[in-house]
Image: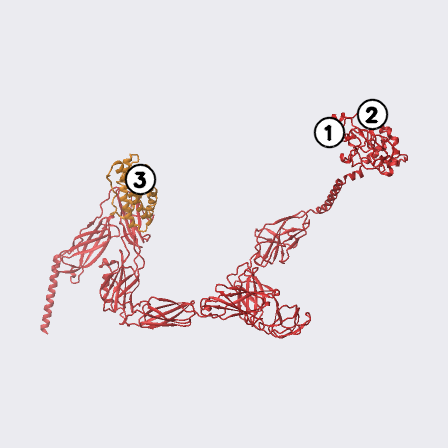
Chain colours: A red, B orange
Amino acid sequence: MALFAVFQTTFLLVWLSSRTYQSEVLAGHLPLTPESLNISINSELQRLHLQWTVHNLPRHQELKMVFQIEISRMNTSNVIWVGNYSTTVKWDQVQRWSWESELPLECATHFVRIRSVVDDATFPGLSFWSSWSSWEKVHVLDPPGPNSLLIFPVDKLVEEGANITICYVSGVNKKNISCYFHNNLVPGEKLSPNASAFKLNNVPFTSATGTNFFCGVENGDLQNGTVLLVSKILEEPKDFSCETRDFQTLKCTWDPGVDTRLSWIKQLFQNYTLFESFSREKEHCEHNNSCNWPIHQHPQETYNFTLTAANSIRKRSVNIVFNLTHRGETSEGAHCGHECNFICTLCGEPDVETPRLGFCRFSPKEINTRGHVHPKAPDDVHFEYIRATEARMIWKVHNLGNLFTHLCHVQLEGEGKVIQHNVSIKVDGKESFRDLTPATEYVARMRCANADHFWKWSEWTVRNFTTVEAAPSVAPDVWRKVKSENGSCNVTLFWKPLSKFHANGKIRFYNVTTENLDKPFELQLYTIAASANRTELAFEQCSHQIRVTANNNVGASPASVMVVTRDSGNGVTFTVFSKMSVFITCEEPMNISRGHKESRPHLSGAQGSDKNEPQRLELSPHHRLPAPVLSAQVRLGLRKSRREEADEERIRGTADGFILSWKPQPRGITGYVVEWCQRRQLQLCDLQWETLGPNYTRTVISTDTFRPGVRYDFAIYGITTERIAYLLEKRTGYSQELAPSDNPQVQVTNLTSRSFNLSWENYSTESQPGFIQGYHVYLKAKAGQCHPGFEKAVLSDSLVYCKHNISDPEQKTFIVGNLQPESSFEFFVKSYTSAGEGPNGTFKKVRTTDEHSHMLVRIIVPMTLCVLIIVVMCCWKSQWVKEKCLPDIPDPYKSSILSLINSKENLHLTIMNVKDCIPDALEVTEVTRTQFPGTGKPLTESELTKPAYLYLLPTEKDYSGPGPCICFENLTYNQSASNSGPGRVPGPQDLPCRLGLSTSPDNLQKMIEINYTNSLGEIPAGETSLNYVSQLASLVSGDKDSLPTNPPEPAHCSEYKMQMAMPSCLASPPPRESSSLSSVTLSGQGEYYH
Amino acid sequence: MSQIRNQLLQLNGSADALFILYYTAQGEPFPNNLDKLCAPNVTDFPPFHANGTEKARLVELYRVAAYLGTALGNVTRDQKLLNPQALSLHSKLNSTADTLRGLLSNVLCRLCGKYHVARVDVTYGPDTSGKDVFQKKKLGCQLLGKYKQVVGVAAQAF
């Protein structure tokens, strides 16, 4: 024990003496000042690399030391950074450290100095700072030339969101230099008279081609710039996983995330490296989202992969640990501590290049405990059998050595449905499908996965197959149109194609079989192509049963049966729903049929009896009384159905369609059929129908083919147990009523001073896109007032009108009354439906007439007509009128003179009759120049110089009595007349008829009264060689000018000179009974003429 | 000669579009500072005198075409690197370089055939491979500005 104590004391003394010696030795070498400071520059990284040594260290001696580094900019007093760097220093070892400057080193001179202190607990006596080393100047760029402008850094690569400082160095005396980034002026910080710095914070990514930073002297040519390459931030790979499909290769995949590639070669797409820590193998991935890892012959079960993404700026990594087959235990976190350091050195964060100042971090992102076997898609798929409703599929999975049980997922898709099954297999799988639809294409899919440790499903393997056909399962939906005429029927059959579900294959044709009910077993078969959906049949006798089947390659469908009778068209059908008595009168013997069966008993007592004698008939339910029926009296429960008489009820479409309902039928109804068609197109329309069961009394007809503004007619039929259809009710309506498309064309009639009538009889209400409910008669309001019966209304033009509503659509006339005469009105008539009025149009003007105008019309028109008739009559009978009213030679017996004379009671006066005169020749010795009356044309000299002789010879006819008569030549007659020769007397056709009265009879009478006795004596003598005075001339005046105006009158007497020629129109034989009297009376008056 | 004339007219017709395509692809501040960044100040650019003899004009045109051919080659190379997405610009640069090569061949043929000039000393444009990105953009813009100017004069001269 004492020995041990001695040994211990000795050891302590030796150790203490040794430490004392070392301290003394170190103290002898002090100070431990850093020396040989050398600074190198990396301009691209803007880094200063420092190297120095520590002298005075004993050989093979290590010390923990702290070095303090001080960096100044521009001058030594401007210290911009001070920091410590701790390390273990060995003898004769060069120390290295670097520093990154935020400012490009080219723009400012930097100064660096360093000092040290021993930070070693074994040498506490040395814990004091050494003296500073001398300042080391870092000068990168010499002053540029006077016309230079240099900008730094050059082509700098930074990450999005980073802060960066840009600076320029210019030549001397260059001022007013401005810099722009993204066209925005950047404020700068003056570093020196010729250098400025510009700090850009949070720089954005704008383009893969970089962003220009531009500086220039204002109003000068000096300019320069640099391009800042801003990269997107490298992201950590996502969804990193590895799997094997064949135990040969592990395929690791991931989502690389954002592409940090720049258009410039300075940064390519980020690269990826895969490192497995257990095997310590490393793989540089060729693709940016996957990497293949070979599995060795004796595969390891657990893998620890680290995926590292790197670009020029940074690195990012993720890690997974998994058991490939999962036969071992979970190893979660087992390798973390062991592998951390290694992974840190491999996939460190951005400070990997400065590990001494950085931090090494590693935390596994995921330790995957699932298996990573990803089976291949099943193959060798085939069907053992495929039938109409079932099939069996067989397949195999990729053989992995029977080590695994596979879970296979089988899907069957068809007819819009998907059926799924899961099957557990080793290698071979099979699955049966049942309840399939015939002739239907199905898609079978299957995929498999590791059933023990599910990782991923394999890809789908898809196979299509089609089940075989079967006979159609239902009868086709058939409907008909029947036209009966003269006992024969034309039947148009319509049918709807069977749905794919019911057709069970492709329909090849339709069979239509007809059976004449009056001639049983007489069948006709028609085969109709599958593409047709209708056919027409003609029956001489209507009563037929029709059976329609759809046929495919396998067989025929059930038959659709219907019975057509003559009454199916426009005939008369009585359907009996309960037993009853019917009194019926027929025009001929009538059979009673019971449905389509042959039980057609004769109407009891009808045959051989008088056809109009009512018969009584007991009817059982569903007896049908076919036409011809003259009349029928139904006592009870007899329903009469006639197409023409079925009421047509109006319905209105809704958003869901047309809602139709009908009264339920008591019994014996197997169903209903609702048919519809566009109105007015019964012949051409696409007939649609819907078949309903017997319990339906309501349905909604909804189809996309209904169009607004189109009227559709619906008919509801009941189907009896005998398959006979009879019409129950009719409907008509619009799916959506629209306002009228046009307005009535209004005619104005019966226009009076107080009213007028508007009429639009030709307006068709049927062709409108809605039910016309009435009309609105608009009048333009005058002074804001409306007539009675009108109300104010405002139309779309915001003007006030007077409106009258006609609510009866059939009333197509309207009388606008109580109006003022000679007033203007403007009217317009619009029809309207429930959707609104018709379109706007132009108002028509109408003006009431004058109140008296009609009276004037009533007077003036008849008067005018009378005058016209008189004038026409006068022209037509002018000769007669003249003769009657104003004869040139008045009838002495009717003359007013005679009445005047008679009034003076001169009873001795007589009238000479011309027939008493026998004319002779008269020679005229002197001729007076005169004009031919009426023409104004004087006779020519030759005509005048030639003596004219007029032989006035009596004719046998004209001569009525004895006595000579003196005749003379009248030179006022034309030459032709005078030349006509003796014995020729110009007839009536030779002279124009002239009427020339110089005065009226009244004046004439007055003159006679005044001058009768002296007038003749006052005729001036000597003006003519021969003066003659006719009776008229002597009565009028002695004016010679009046002669031409008074045409010569026929002279019949011989006592006085008179002209013989006279117009025929004026010549009339004197009355015979007065002829003797006239000859006597005029004998005493001839002396007044010379 | 007509081929030379037509080629010059073709180059002149497309020079402006090429210039616009180029400075647009470089981004700001080029489009708004054409007078500063794209002024036709190209050192060592061969002179061209429109009023000289045909032979002299052809010789000068040959030098210009040779200079432009190489310089445009540099510009095309730089732009494919700096603006790989500017495909229309690349296409235009390539077609212009092709036409320049054809022009160079025709001018030499004319000189040789008519004037028996078999060799012309030429200068080439500066190599921009060592320049920074901004300088590449700027030099290219200046070159295309000069190209537009000189090809217009040459087209008028012939």
Tell me the kind of residue under disc 2. Ala
Q: Residues within 10 Å of mark 2 (few under 14, many from 20)?
A: few
Q: Which residue is mark 3?
A: B4
- x, y (%) of residue A990? 76, 34
Above or below — where is A675 with respect to B123? below
Mark pair 1, 3: CA separation:
107 Å
Q: Which residue is mark 2?
A: A1021
Tell me the kind of residue under disc 3. Ile
Mark pair 1, 2: CA separation:
26 Å
Q: Nearer the viewer, residue A348 or B82?
A: B82
Mark pair 3, 2: CA separation:
131 Å
Residue A614: image quadrant is: bottom right
The answer to whether residue A217 shows anywhere in this view is no
Q: Residues within 10 Å of mark 3 (few under 14, many from 20)?
A: some
Q: Which residue is mark 1?
A: A937
Tell me the kind of residue under disc 1. Lys
Query: At numbered mark 2, what does the secondary structure look like: helix, strand or loop?
Result: loop
Query: At numbered mark 3, what does the secondary structure look like: helix, strand or loop?
Result: helix
Q: Are marks 3 and 2 on the same chain?
A: no
Which numbered circle lies on residue A620? Answer: none
Query: Callout 2: residue from which chain?
Result: A
- In the drawing, does residue A779 fall left or right of residue A82? right
- x, y (%) of residue A577? 60, 73
Q: Nearer the viewer, mark 1 or mark 2?
A: 1
Q: Earlier in the sequence, mark 1 or mark 2?
A: 1
- x, y (%) of residue A1002? 82, 36
Q: Residues within 10 Å of mark 1 (few under 14, many from 20)?
A: few
Above or below — where is A641 with respect to A915? below
